[in-house]
Image (cartoon, grey):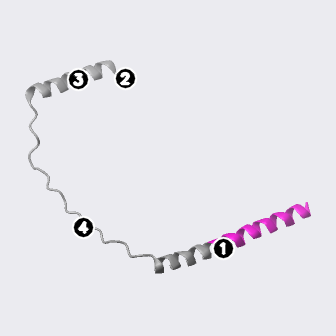
Amino acid sequence: MSQAIDLMIAGMGFVFVFLIILVFATGIMSKIIGRFAPPEPATPARTPRAKSSAPAKVDPDTAEAIKKAIAQYRSRHKK
């Protein structure tokens, strides 16, 4: 049992040390890449689109067809 605990502690210790080294290596690589990488191109600012104040007109035949389709769907899918 003592050997198992020693082995577990050693394994966890190696993993912890490896992760610490990995964090530092990633930080160093990030700084190196940031120094030698070309600058990012500037993106143009987006202009907000103008929204129309009046809703689009729907022709009466289309509105009636939509109403019938909704009624048919609801009659088939009652809960």
Let me know if residue 4 is in the magenta part: yes
Instruction: Single out the mark in the foreground, 1 or 2.
Output: 1
Which region is colored magenta?
1-22
Residue 45's tag is 4
* Chain-order first, disc 4 or disc 3: 4
Q: Earlier in the sequence, mark 2 or mark 4?
A: 4
Distance between the alpha carbons at the discs numbered 4 and 3: 43 Å
Front position among marks 2 and 4: 4
Residue 3 occupies quadrant: bottom right
Residue 71: % across, % down: 23, 22
Question: Which amino acid is tagged 3?
Answer: Ala
What separation in Å lies between label 1 and label 4 (alpha carbons)?
40 Å
Q: CA distance from mark 3 to mark 1?
A: 63 Å
What amino acid type should be assigned to the residue bearing mark 2? Lys
Q: For residue 45: magenta? A: no
Residue topped by disc 1? 20
Residue 7: quadrant of the picture: bottom right
Residue 66 left/right relative to 3: left
Tell me the number on the disc at residue 69. Answer: 3
Question: Are the residues tagged 2 and 4 within 8 Å (C-beta)?
Answer: no
